[in-house]
Image: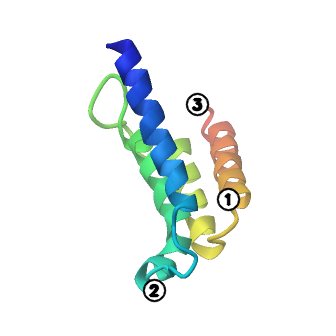
Amino acid sequence: MVLLTILLMGVIVFVMRFSFFAIPRDWTMPKLVERSLPYVLPAVLLAMLVPGVFLTDEGPLRDPIYGPYLIGVVAGFAVGAVKKDNFFLVFGSSVLAFAVAKVVFAQ
């Protein structure tokens, strides 16, 4: 079963990566998709961080909700909304805001 899973995952990864080379040269991306691409970074960052902000291992919601995690996510999202194409700036500002809030709240 493990070997079958490894083989299937290899096939899936190969197909996903090969699909970018198999696209015909005259194909163009739909305008709606092209216009929405700059918003992918803030959306993915938010989707990864929001569960860590609001959920804990012990219970369904973090109490209190405000704190270093929320401040880091809000800072990263705000910078990402302004500078959509700079991953390192968004990530760095989020981590910096988290670290400063962690020191200020002494948690």
The residue singled out by tag 1 in the image is 87
> Which numbered mark, 2 or 3, is in the foreground of this view?
2
Most foreground residue, 14 or 80: 14
**Viewer-closest of 87 and 73:** 87
Badge 2 vs badge 3, beta-carbon distance below 8 Å: no
Instruction: Specify which label sits upstream in the sequence, 1 or 3.
Output: 1
Left or right of residue 1, residue 11 in this image: right
Relative vertical location of residue 82 with respect to residue 67 in this rendering, above or below: below
Front-lying residue, 37 or 90: 37
Q: Name which residue type carries label 3.
A: Gln
Question: What is the spatial separation of the Cα atoms under label 2 and label 1, in whole angstroms?
Answer: 23 Å
Residue at 67% x, 59% y: name it: 87
Is 89 situated above or below 72? below
Residue at position x 49%, y 40% from top? 13
Q: CA distance from mark 1 to mark 3?
A: 27 Å
Residue kind at label 1, given as amino acid type = Phe
Where is mark 2, residue-wise? Answer: 31
* 10 Å crowding of disc 2: few (<14), some (14-19), many (20+): few
Residue with the mark numbered 3: 107
Q: Secondary structure at mark 1?
A: helix
Mark count: 3
**On residue 40, which mark appears?**
none
Q: Position of residue 67 (x, y in %)?
A: 51, 44
Q: Earlier in the sequence, mark 2 or mark 3?
A: 2
- Say few, some or many: other residues with alpha carbon within 10 Å of mark 3 (under 14 / 14 to 19 / 20 or more): few
